[in-house]
Image (spheres, grey):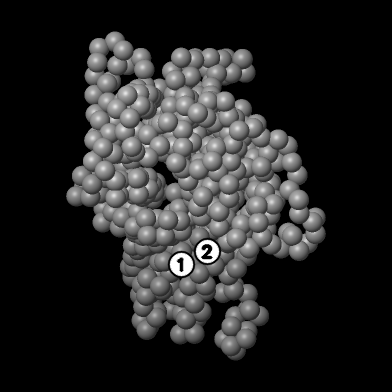
Amino acid sequence: MIESIRHDWASNIRADLLAGLVVALALIPEAIAFSIIAGVDPQVGLYASFCIAVVTAFVGGRPGMISAATGAMALLMVTLVKEHGLEYLLAATLLCGVLQILAGFLRLGDLMRFVSRSVVTGFVNALAILIFAAQLPELTGVTWHVYAMTAAGLAIIYLFPLLPGIGKSVPSPLVCIVGLTALSLVLQLDIRTVGDMGQLPDTLPVFLWPDVPLTLETLRIILPYSVGLALVGLLESMMTATIVDDLTDTQSDKNRECKGQGIANISAGLFGGMAGCAMIGQSVINVKSGGRGRLSTLCAGVFLLVVVVFLDQWLTLIPMAALVAVMIMVSIGTFSWDSLANLKKHPLSSNIVMVTTTTVVVITHNLAIGVFVGVLLAALFFANKIGRFMGVRSELVEQGHRRYEVIGQVFFASSEHFMQSFDFKEVVDRVSIDLNSAHFWDITSVAALDKVVIKFRREGTTVDIVGMNEATQTVVDKFGVYDKPEEVEKLLAGH
């Protein structure tokens, strides 16, 4: 226990502190932008980012992952805020947190094992594209100074680490932000800054209970939004945790992360913040800047609040071009460039799943829809592939006795092929169906077995079924009717 705490909090102190500062600066414009998307005051997103980052640092399941207010969640809040106001959003945030904690206790985080690598790759590529696209408004209709500053920022980010000694000790995104801010002030450039994004809060968040009536009508209003927020939040958090697992070559506790996200959202709702979840962009910034432990996540949240409330005069001077350069770096680092080269190597079905997931997420801007489509496609391709491995061999054992040997998995995708493998018109006295090398999975496959047996018996053929394994025997005994005369009569009578 003590060793685990030491590893999570004190094994990487210097790098975690610097990475947390970089992430805090990158969080500010996004938290403001997401607040604007949701239709609320910028302080709602900033307070949420502070609360969620600090709480997940202690109770989250993935050290080094950054959670805060996000665009995916903000998009789901627009209608609620427009029709019912901020107080109902805070109430929906509290209920969202409760649902996420419940999901953690139900171990729904384990469902991530059903998400294929192709879906994760598509999800990552889509996020990289969306992160890049989100920077385009800052690069449209601007003077050449903005392009020059952005290009200079990218040069600093990628070239500074090549310097001997200092290049590895200070995160290049931090150098980019500080350097471009100083350059902008010295040259007195007339370019867009963080201060132009909106009014920053000047006080610490305070505890408050949402001012809504505690009635069933309130529950009816907020429940659909809370369910959507909980699902999207958990989905994005689980996917981001998987990506950070890969980047750091470590494992995380997905069910603990579900509970942690829930507790964090409850705290955000109680301190005037909107619901949030894990952020892949900021998590990548944290990892690329050297952040690995929980200290980096805590520092990101604390530095965010300190900078916004106490250093707001300096914060407002940061040119947006510097933050755009950092986010472009994130999008480039997030995109799985290997996936393009692997299009020639990987199976067509995997490529279709990956490209479809990417396309749907980019078009809809909804991570849940894109991942759902990807998982559904992957499942259909898998079922089709496994279904083709089922086969039936037959041999005439002796005159009037034919033996069929079923090999493979019999389920909804292969049951039709299973039925077509038998010759019901052949005149034989006895048929043996050997299931030693087969497995029946569902009621569709059991129904197919019933039909085969009943069709043979209609022709006056005796049917013997041998070799069922225990699992197959269980499902056949529960749902099969071929050995239940009264059920067969009902079936034949059309009841």
- Which quadrant is home to the N terminus? top right
**Position of 176 relative to 35 (above/below):** above
Q: Callout 1: 10 Å neighbours few (<14), some, many (20+)?
A: many
**Position of 392 relative to 38 (above/below):** below
Q: Callout 2: 10 Å neighbours few (<14), some, many (20+)?
A: some
Identify residue type, mark 1. Phe
Return the x and y of residue 69 as percentages of the image width and height: 54, 42
Considering the numbered disc 2 on the image, is that residue within a helix, a strand or a loop? loop
Residue name at image x 61 percent, y 57 percent: 81
Q: Quadrant of residue 265?
A: top right
Q: Quadrant of residue 294?
A: top right
Of the numbered discs 1 and 2, the one sitting upstream in the chain is: 1
Q: Which residue is mark 2?
A: 442
Residue 412, disc:
1
Q: Is residue 326 visible?
A: no
Residue name at image x 33 percent, y 62 percent: 388
Residue at the farthest bottom position: 493
Q: Are marks 1 and 2 in contact (CB under 8 Å)?
A: yes
- Which quadrant is home to the C terminus? bottom right
